[in-house]
Image (cartoon, grey):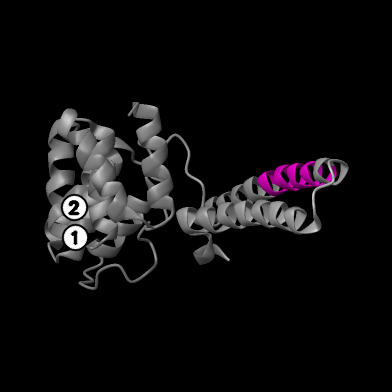
Amino acid sequence: MKARTVDKRVDELIASGKCDEAILVLQKELAKTPDDPRHLFALGVCHFRLKNFGLALTELTQLVDLSPSHKDAWFYKGLTEEKVGDLESARKSFVSALGIDPNFELAIKKLAKLGGGTSQAQTDGEEPDNHVLPGFFSEQKPPAVLRTERFMAFWGRFLFISIFWIGVSLGLAILAANAGFSFPLLILATGSVIGVCLGVFFGNLARLKVSKFM
């Protein structure tokens, strides 16, 4: 699978909340290129969102060792360390992120919160669970947009196929009438076309899981 295709696939899976499936794709790619910073970062974030904090910390630590200037890796590493209660390490990670980008607003807020002596982790809504993952995805669409696009693609495909087969059905009916076929055969031909349309409908419904988006 080409890199751009992988990025798009992972982007769609994460945006749809399917981090477990994204992890499988990323692990397959990392088996071929184990030091790819984009995939390591995305894998760490996926584990973070699934609350696999130990695995997330492993991936993010590996990433900052390989790419010390990756501010977002330092930031997510800090979030993960905060989640497991290692507040001192979290502070250091946020400081590292700010050392790369002094205007990194999320890191500034987290460091101010931890520097204020609070021991309560992630209570003020700053955790970027729906945050665009910079440095990995070329673009990230909100889950609602992706759901709408899939829903429209489903119905567009179904309507196109239905109109096509309705035209075929009418054509067959006209030919059958001109050839003198009996009415039951016309019913059979029309029923077959309707059956194909219904098969396409329910096949796409199952494949795309459109029911969860309705």
> What is the crowding at mark 2: few (fewer than 14 residues within 10 Å), some, or many (at least 20)?
many
Q: Residue 162: percent from the left, percent from the top?
A: 69, 49
Relative to residue 45, is residue 145 drawn left or right? Answer: right
| Residue in view at x 26 percent, y 66 percent | 116
Q: Which residue is mark 1?
A: 52
Task: Write down the quadrant of residue 10 in the picture.
Answer: top left
Please state the horizontal and vertical placement of residue 109, each as a whole percent of the image.
35, 57
Which amino acid does the dot numbered 2 rest on?
Ala
**Helix or strand or loop: what does disc 1 sit on?**
loop
102 lies left or right of 187: left
How busy is the neighbourhood of tag 1: few (under 14 within 10 Å), some, or many (20 plus)? some
In front here: 127 or 119?
127
Res 15 label? none
Give the amino acid at mark 1: Asn
72 shown above or below 208: above
Q: Residue furthest right?
A: 178
Q: Answer whether residue 94 is visible to the viewer in this image.
A: no
Q: Are marks 2 and 1 in contact (CB under 8 Å)?
A: yes
178 w.r.t. 82: above or below: above
Identify the residue at image location x=12%, y=35%.
65
When asked about the image quadrant of residue 125, the answer is bottom left
The magenta stretch is 160-174
Dot 2 corresponds to which residue? 56
